[in-house]
């Protein structure tokens, strides 16, 4: 029997219909893949003059994002902490001379700076697309090498610094027909927690793995919204997104109980996608002509999402009540600059 959601549908766009609850049926169903979006956009082999940067490519949906992006003909710089693992995951993509693997440990900001310098050098000063994909999830309470709460530091601050060090390239590379884009991979998990500007590192207590994850994923949204506010009129746009749910042993290593529980939940299993489908919303944000010239959007299901209906569960489509908050976005931007030591 088809499972139909009892709440308003929150997605709009050419792929929205495929995400309706009466149409979803688990990994490999009719929901679009990243490669299908590249083909639908007519972009196979056409972006040979463009440069993209993708973080977190050694596991999960990262390699699928790279495969789809590389099929456009663009030059693609990709980052990983474990280079051998990334080489294995990317395989023959690294033989194409279009995909360039760089080292970056996002728990150590010195490596972010070194990676940004390498992108600047090897790209010839050009960068059109940045997809901030790397993340950790539901970790024990730990700190990065720079002393920041691990999930906030890895998921938000490292990407903030990477963007900040390369924003001049993104601005300079933007053209009237192809505006530059920054795509932040957030999560429906942003609905676990807003950003607490007075307790970013949980120095005042209250740490939970999911709460810290939620805060970091809300921070991803805030960063994208503020990019749009500051630079949208200059041809640089920011997007945030939820890729949906998928099985990723590396990302989910601290929440295996929840993963096992999901396997016994019919609604959850219908919502889950495979890696090729999970990467679709990142590719949509990076390439879709439907979004050209307009950012500050939260994307889901390779569609534009609206606010999540009240009393919905964590996998219902849409963004939380706190996902768009100009005052907090502006404050987090300034706090983040101080934390990573820019300006």
Image (spheres, grey):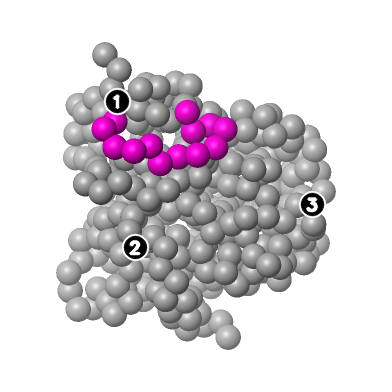
Of the 4 image quadrants, the one containing the C terminus is: bottom right
Q: CA distance from mark 2 to mark 3?
A: 33 Å
| SS at mark 1 in the image | loop
What residue is drawn where x is 64% and y is 65%? Answer: 232
Where does the N terminus fall, quadrant-wise? top left
Label annotation for residue 322 = 2
Residue 272 shown in magenta: no
Which corner quadrant of the image does residue 130 belong to?
Answer: bottom right
Residue at far bottom of view:
343
Q: Position of residue 259 (x, y in %)?
A: 25, 37
- Left or right relative to 263: residue 162: right
Distance from the alpha carbon under mark 3 to that under mark 1? 40 Å
Secondary structure character of the magenta stretch overall = loop
Mark 3 — residue?
177
The residue labelled by disc 1 is: 4
Q: Are marks 3 and 1 in contact (CB under 8 Å)?
A: no
Going 64% across and 43% down the picture, which residue do you hit?
A: 290
Q: For the view shown, which residue lies furthest in the front direction?
A: 8
Asked if residue 12 is among those painted magenta in the image, a careful observer would answer: yes
Q: Residue at x 74, y 35 (%)?
A: 43
Q: Residue 96, how many percent across, how many down?
A: 74, 37
Q: Earlier in the sequence, mark 2 or mark 3?
A: 3
**Lower position in the chain sequence, tag 3 or tag 1:** 1
Residue stretch rendered in magenta on the structure: 5-17
Q: Position of residue 11 (x, y in %)?
A: 45, 40
């Amino acid at each position: 029997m088809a499972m139909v959601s009892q709440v308003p549908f929150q997605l709009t766009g050419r792929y929205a219909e495929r995400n309706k609850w009466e149409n979803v049926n688990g990994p490999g169903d009719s929901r679009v893949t990243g490669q299908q979006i590249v083909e639908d956009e007519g972009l196979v082999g056409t972006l040979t003059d463009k440069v993209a940067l993708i973080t977190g490519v050694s596991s999960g949906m990262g390699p699928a994002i790279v495969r789809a992006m590389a099929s456009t003909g663009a030059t693609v710089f990709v980052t990983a902490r474990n280079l051998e693992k990334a080489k294995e995951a990317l395989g023959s993509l690294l033989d194409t001379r279009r995909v360039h693997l760089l080292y970056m440990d996002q728990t150590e900001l010195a490596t972010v700076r070194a990676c940004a310098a390498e992108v600047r050098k090897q790209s010839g000063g050009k960068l059109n697309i940045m997809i901030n994909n790397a993340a950790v999830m539901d970790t024990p309470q730990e700190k990065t090498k720079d002393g920041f709460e691990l999930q906030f530091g890895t998921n938000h601050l490292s990407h903030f610094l990477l963007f900040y060090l390369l924003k001049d390239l993104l601005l300079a590379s933007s053209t009237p027909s192809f505006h530059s884009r920054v795509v932040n991979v957030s999560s429906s998990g942003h609905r676990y927690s807003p950003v607490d500007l007075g307790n970013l590192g949980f120095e005042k207590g209250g740490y939970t793995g999911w709460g810290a994850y939620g805060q970091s994923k809300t921070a991803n949204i805030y960063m994208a919204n503020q990019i749009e506010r500051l630079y949208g009129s200059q041809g640089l746009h920011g997007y945030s997104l939820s890729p949906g749910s998928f099985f990723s042993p590396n990302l989910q290593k601290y929440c295996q109980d929840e993963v096992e529980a999901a396997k016994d939940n019919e609604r959850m299993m219908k919502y889950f996608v495979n890696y090729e489908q999970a990467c679709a919303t990142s590719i949509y944000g990076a390439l879709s002509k439907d979004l050209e010239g307009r950012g500050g959007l939260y994307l889901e299901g390779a569609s534009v999402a609206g606010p999540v209906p009240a009393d919905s569960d964590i996998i219902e489509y849409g963004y939380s009540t706190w996902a768009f908050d100009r005052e907090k976005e502006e404050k987090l931007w300034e706090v983040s600059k101080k934390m990573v030591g820019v300006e």
